[in-house]
Amino acid sequence: MTSSEKPSLDPHPLSPYVAWAGERNREPILELFKERFPKSEGNVLEFASGSGMHIHYFAPNFPYLSFQPSDVNEEVFENIRELTKKTQVKNVQPPIKLDLTQPQTWSALIGQKFDAIFCINIFQVAPISIADGMMNCAVNYLSDRGSLFIYGPFKVDGSYTTPSNEEFDTTLLSYKVPAWGLKDVVDITKAGQKYGLALKEKVDMLSHNFTLIYSLS
């Protein structure tokens, strides 16, 4: 298989499919972050870091920021630590366990504030209920200037924005996994409003995806 060929759908964070998708989307996301991330010292948290591919790609571009990877699945921590060694990136911290559905796991964040929190390609394979925990966690640990960035494919007001997104959703639903399928921006935004986070911007991205940017309302 060449790097341009699309592997079979597999949401496991260490799968060839996730690596392929990550390589395709990382540069457009980085360009957005260069525009929107703080220009001075601060802290950045990634929800659901998976293999760590994104955080290690972004961090060298922001040497004045400290990046904190996290994931519910401790199986990926070795890969994250190995990437840190391999890339010799100095501003990525050791990974921590965060389960957005279990607030007791957020104790690792106590005493910290983050100037940016980001999450990439999670909602198409996670239940919409995770949005509640994500917003609750974010509002507790964002700094006053901080924003939450959520990247991925979404429906908007109950509709598909492109035929390709409808086709992707059909593929996801065909696997009969209850959590799989495109989620609606409206539902994620309702979860944010519950905790005082407002959708400030919906940015069009590569492959008909979006970055949703939430901050304190």
Image (cartoon, grey):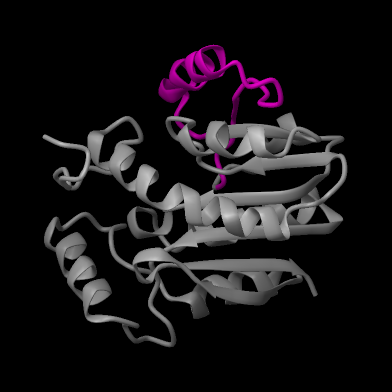
Assess whether residue 4 is covered by the magenta stretch.
no
Q: Position of residue 21 (x, y in %)?
A: 32, 47
Q: Residue at x 52, y 34 (%)?
A: 71
Picture quarter with the C terminus: bottom right
Looking at this view, is 45 or 180 the one in front? 45
Q: Which residues are magenta?
A: 71-100
Q: How many marks?
A: 0
Viewer-nearest residue: 144 or 134: 144
Vertical placement of residue 4 versus 57, above or below: below
Question: Residue 123, located in which quarter of the rendered image?
Answer: bottom left
Q: 141 or 129: which is nearer to us?
A: 141
Among the 4 quarters of the image, the one containing residue 182: bottom left
Quadrant of residue 69 in the image? top right
87 sits to left or right of 164: right
Q: How far across and down, in percent of the image, does residue 33 sit?
A: 64, 54
Residue drawn where x is 65% and y is 69% of the image: 192
Is 208 located above or below residue 53 in the figure? below
- Is there any visible trace of residue 32 in the rendered image? yes
Q: Quadrant of the N terminus?
A: top left
Left/right of residue 26 with respect to residue 93 in the rendered view? left
Drawn side of residue 52 relative to residue 6, left or right: right
Q: Residue at x 39, y 54 (%)?
A: 126
Q: Is residue 105 visible?
A: no
Q: Residue at x 68, y 37 (%)?
A: 106
Q: Front-most of 21 and 139?
A: 21
